[in-house]
Image (cartoon, rainbow, N blue to C red):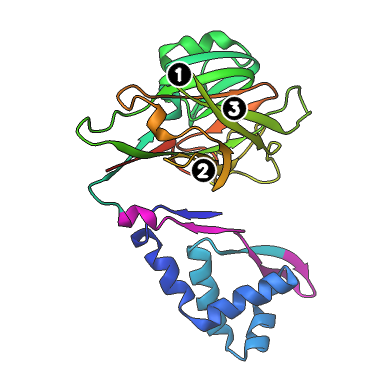
Amino acid sequence: MLHYKDVGAAQKLCECLAAPARVEILKLILAKRAESLDSLAKTLHLTNGAITQHVKKLCELGLVKLIETPGKRGIAKRCVVAVDRIIIDVATDLEDDSVRVFDIPIGSFFSASVNPYCALASASGWIGERDDPRYFTYPERTDAALIYFNSGKIGWTLPAPDKKTKLSSLSLSFEISSKPYGRGRSRDTAVTFFINDVKLGEYFCDGEFTDRKGLYTPAVFDDVCQYGKFRTLRIDNIGTFIDGVKIGSHTIDEFDSEQLAFYMSADNGLAIFGNEFGDYDCGIRCRLEQG
């Protein structure tokens, strides 16, 4: 997956796909799973030199990659698609003075009561020993970019909005997956969300994902869940929603906007991905809308 945080960052991608030949190359590779450069040139009636330049551009953007396979005359290079999804965040370019967006590092939690299997990891390695909840109290926890636990509850303080203006909605976006409750065993997880002491609702989180490397997951981590799914929890004056699906009736008017804390809890295993881990290079993205 490719993730661009704003339209400007995706400019080169858009320029690359503006060439019809490159779009056709992608279609052919997707249809046949893999294609040789010679086959692409013949099918599209282009020279080998032109195909090479188009493929080179697609490789530079991370859309395709070349793999070597045995051929009739030695090793042959074949093109395969290197990405399954492309996400471009557009709304970040549309914010106004009534909207504030914050990226909360997942290691900045102020409260954690968790049980093994559990662990904290930064981009450079594990923080303390795995399966020892004590390390969730150590100062080094602030460097965490991956958090997982079998059961428990964890909470973060949210940025305080402007006191002069009423808070009209609160959105929290995060990347999560389930975590095995025993080595080699995984299952879906019911994750419960809270604001302060109020239970907002539940979301059933998919099993852990290990079929490929996470886009940002460091190479040294090959024995953990690699990525999750990016979800958005929103509380407004209508109710509480996950990705647009209503999960509760609590509204933003019920909360003291000067003192907000966000909690996640799970009983069947939960993994939370932050900066430099998973498919999204961010922590908990907090969006406050006022007015």
Residue at label 3? Answer: 192
Where disc 2 sits, the SS reads: loop
Residue segment shown in magenta: 69-94
Please state the horizontal and vertical placement of residue 142, each as a whole percent of the image: 41, 21
Whole-angstrom CA distance, mark 3 to mark 2, is 26 Å
Q: Does 259 sit left or right of 185 as displayed?
A: left
Q: Residue furthest top?
A: 134
Magenta includes 224? Answer: no
* Residue at image location 41% in from the left, 34% down from the top: 252
Q: Quadrant of the C terminus?
A: top left
* Residue at image location 46% in from the left, 15% down from the top: 111
Q: Quadrant of the N terminus?
A: bottom right
Residue 141 is marked as 1
Please state the horizontal and vertical placement of residue 35, each as a whole percent of the image: 70, 73
Around disc 1, counting alpha carbons within 10 Å, would you say few (fewer than 14), some (14 to 19), or many (20 or more)?
A: many
Residue at label 2? Answer: 216
Do the numbered discs 3 and 2 sit on residues whose CB atoms are within 8 Å?
A: no
* Residue at image location 57% in from the left, 42% down from the top: 246
Please state the horizontal and vertical placement of residue 167, each as a whole percent of the image: 32, 36
Q: Report which quarter residue 113 is drawn in.
A: top right
From the viewer's perspective, is the residue at label 1 or at label 3 nearer? 3
Earlier-in-chain disc, 1 versus 3: 1
Please state the horizontal and vertical placement of residue 144, each as a whole percent of the image: 47, 25
> On screen, 38 above or below 80?
below
The kind of residue on which mark 2 rests is Tyr
Where disc 3 sits, the SS reads: strand
Tell me if I can see residue 287 in this picture: no
Tell me if I can see residue 156 in this picture: yes
